[in-house]
Amino acid sequence: MTLGDALGLSNFHERVLVWVLQIALAGLLVYGLAVAQMAIVAATVIGLAVTFLPALLRREYGYRMDAGLVLWISLAMILHVVGFLGFYDQYHWYDEITHTISATVTAGLGYAAFRALELHSKNIDVPSEFRAVFIVVFVLAAGMFWEVLEFVFSGLVTVYGIDDIVTDIVFNAVGAIIVAIWGTGYVDGVIGFFRERLRSKSET
């Protein structure tokens, strides 16, 4: 069962919901430019680019991503951008939610790439238990890389200190564990796409 099936989403519902989120992001971009908040502008531009990625994959490679996954990715991006409107400063729990959701997206994509490589190569045979460990380690590594970027670009984003970093890592791990236990089956379509791309590369 796909995530879209679990949520009862059709491709039409997916398009409408993603359009709504993209319009909201476009509005936030205009707001960020109007008030000269570069953190909002940068986050919104990245968010919009990510929400258009499924459509680009469909056009360039004929791959139609599951409606639930498209909404999942788009929702993670807009929640992150909305946080810059003051939610991160006023509500500490909001940061925890966004990190958890973003971590599930990172975990899902990381697992899909890893599993596709495993299926593609005859020399790689990984026990299922290690796949779960890989998901958590991958998300924690990606999370640490993100924290380093925040320090590098501290002029654009607010750095809250060590306690905040530790909390972010904890909730990144929560998102990774959620995917490791319940979510790997929802990215089968992405695994198939990655595997097909690997096969195409090896044949050229």
Image (tube, grey):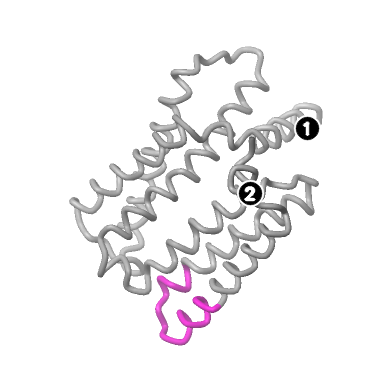
Toward which corner of the image does residue 20 lie, by quadrant? bottom right
Q: Residues within 10 Å of mark 1 (few under 14, many from 20)?
A: few
Which structural element holds mark 1?
helix
* SS majority, magenta: helix
**In x, y percent, where is residue 131?**
48, 23
Magenta part of the protein: which range? Answer: 27-42
Left or right: 14 with respect to 165? right
What residue is at 41 percent from the left and 37 percent from the top? 176
Extreme-front residue of the structure: 8
Q: On the rendered image, what quadrant is the C terminus found in?
A: top right
- Taking the spot 25% from the left edge, 60% from the top edge, the residue there is 92
Name the residue that disc number 2 marks. Answer: 8
Position above or below: 115 against 147: above
Kind of residue at badge 2: Gly
Where's the N terminus, which quadrant?
Answer: top right
Q: Do tag 1 and tag 2 residues touch (Cβ < 8 Å)? A: no
Which kind of residue does numbered mark 1 sit on? Ser
Q: State how far apart marks 1 and 2 are (Cα).
A: 33 Å
The residue shown at (18%, 51%) is 163
Q: Position of residue 48 (x, y in %)?
A: 58, 65
> Quarter of the image holding residue 194?
top right
State whether residue 189 is above or below residue 159: above
Left-right relation of 27 to 93: right
Q: Position of residue 114 (x, y in %)?
A: 56, 29
Q: Which residue is mark 1?
A: 200
- Let me know if residue 40 is in the magenta part: yes
Foreground: 27 or 147? 27
Q: How many marks?
A: 2
